Image (cartoon, grey):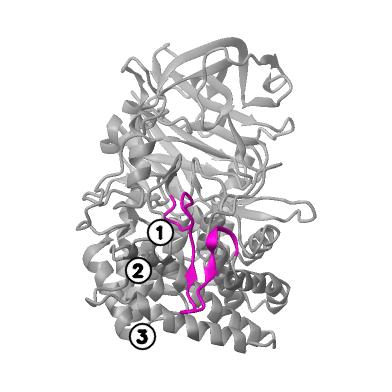
Amino acid sequence: MAYDLKKHTMAEQLPNEIAFGREICGDIAQAERREWWLSNGLGGYASGTIAGTLTRCYHGLLIAPIQPPLGRMLLAAKADATLIDTAGREWPLFTNRWSSGVVDPVGHQFLESFRLEGRMPVWKFRCSGHRLEMRIWLEPGAHTTCVAYRLEADILQPAEAMLKIRLLTNFRDHHGRTVPRSFDPSVEETSQGLRLVHPGETSLYIKTWKGSVRAEHAWVEGFDLPVERERGLPDRDSHFSPGEAFFTLRPGEWSGVIFSLDENAEPDLDASLQRFRSADVDVLAGAENYNPATKNAPEWIRQLTLAADSFLFARPLPGNPEGESIIAGYPWFGDWGRDTMIALPGLTLATGRHGAALHILETFARFIDQGMLPNVFPGIGDLPDFNTVDAALWYIEAWRAYVETTGDVDACRRAFPALKEIVHSYQKGTRYGIHMDLADGLIFAGEPGVQLTWMDAKVGDTVFTPRIGKPVEINALWHNALCTMAALAELLELPAPQYHLLAATARAGFQRFAREDGEGLLDVLDGPDSNDQSIRPNQILAVSLHYSPLEAEAQKSVVAVCQSHLLCTFGLRSLAPSHPDYRSHYLGGAWERDSAYHQGPVWGWLLGHYAVALQRVSGDTRQAQELLGGIRFHLHDVGLGTISEIFDGAPPHHPRGCPAQAWSVACTLEAWWKL
């Protein structure tokens, strides 16, 4: 049944796909496993667990780029609330995990339910007869976090209750940990709350809505971070408390705390709540206006549509104030060239955000050099790092998708010289040995000690999957780029024969990837140790890309091999289990994890490509869509409402890596859009 946004209240217009009761909320292991994530479109974010514990160094109420675009700092850590009734009885509405191994208090035991209203996390507590709702949201387009509470009416309980909130703040890089007394802010009381001043740096404003504050100067030490310990990283943290906030709660009225970098941030929680809801409704409406089929999409697709918006953020450049980019994943990634271009169609075109797509494409055009796109986008004063062979080829594919979707010939005309430069540079040769082999028209890439493909894990001087030679997906992308250039040249009434000739040569050369045993494609041709016959998922791009270099039967062989050896519910394994280097689990410290990164873990971004490839060879759209539907249940786990980066290769395929990954979300949405 179509979902008509105009016939529902604002709250009813938002997906309520993600919801849990006491069986999850009251179980500390289950409640900590599930995390909520919010972003503000400026590179800032907030995150935490259902239980309210801090299990990562990245959990907090306000993480913002003090040095834009992505110099992110943890500024507000927690708001630990205690409910106090008229008889003086107290109930903690928070839970803390300490380095001693103790969990105290255990406020999650009073949780009756948790849900996402769109992207907004909503908790409902029952403390004896008192029922209380808590919400957290970020003000759209501002470094402002709201933590709000509302008492629900009950005829058997007094009409009022008190709330006391311990405020916990910080001032560290979001990757780091804090040593007590490592910074010493001044704490000033203001008419609306508190102002924390970090000398020579910035100010954090803490405001109350229908409450008051009492300033102090204290440290709370010894927070335990079990997820960081699991990753082989430091697992203790401390936070600074500038004071406490106090409220008289009345049924139906919002009260709470606002953390902001903006001195003029409006503390009206009712108005701010409506702005956040309205922003989510606008995202859904934009997607439905562009693609009417979205009205018939299941709730989990609508939830992913909201998740898609969370990765887009403003990246203004000199002369280009409308610059935008894509954060590759929360919490620890920035914007990467490869990830951005792979994710762009699903995050923007499939959701009707065509203006954002163009802004991103034009932002990255500024950084093309020697026909290459940066892998890691530079920060202020930094030089871009161009160690990627595929980002520029994905850039051409992103332009193809944009022009096909929008018909924007003028933008295509402006971009064509840059796209032409990419093809010319790859043909004649550019960094890291990247060049076209005249013998077969294929792209060779790689030098010792450099990781150039998406299988790019490296620790120190060790590259775990170097793939020097002619990687299969790079040459599928090369053929796709040449066909795209021919089509765009014809659209612009420019000479196209050279691109047709190069594409035909690359297509003929690509047949060399066919394995002699008929089991799909080789992974790398002409490497230092001859050809690499490892069964990897890279070959699926030779079927899923818009222009395939394979005939129908060869396409079927690729899909069959991926299905037999690599397909899991959440994506494709990065290496077949039969290979001696296969790693079934992604665990341990940095070396253990990075050495396993592309040697078996399941990658979520490849599920969409497999579904598109399956439909191409079978013609069965329904089967392909049902395959995508397997990811729905993952939206209820770990990163709620979004999709993880990777999963263990062995059942039950535990989510690993980044809990909210742009291309995992994007490729699922793009495949749904195409299907």
Residue 204 falls in image quadrant: top right
Q: In the image, which disc is placed on residue 610?
A: 2
Q: In the image, which disc is placed on residue 551?
A: 3
Q: Residue 200 at x, y = what percent?
A: 74, 22
Going from N to C along the chain, the mark reached first, 1 or 3, is: 1
Cβ atoms under marks 1 and 2 closer than 8 Å = no
Whether residue 431 appears in this view of the structure is yes
Q: Amino acid at mark 2?
A: Tyr
Q: Amino acid at mark 1?
A: Arg
Residue 314 sits inside the magenta stretch: no
Q: Residue at x 49, y 51 (%)?
A: 450
Q: Amino acid at mark 3?
A: Glu
**Residue 207 position (above or below residue 484):** above
Q: CA distance from mark 2 to mark 3?
A: 17 Å
**Which residue corresponds to mark 1?**
467
* Mark 2: few/some/many CA within 10 Å (<14, 14-19, 20+): many
Q: Residue 199 at x, y = what percent?
A: 72, 19
Q: Secondary structure at mark 1?
A: loop
User: Which mark is nearer the camera, 1 or 2?
Assistant: 1
Q: Nearer the viewer, residue 675 or 543?
A: 543
| Magenta-highlighted residues | 430-456
User: Which mark is nearer the camera, 1 or 3?
Assistant: 1
Q: Residue at x 64, y 63 (%)?
A: 361
**Residue 403 position (above or below residue 354):** below
Secondary structure mostly taken by the magenta-highlighted segment of the chain: loop
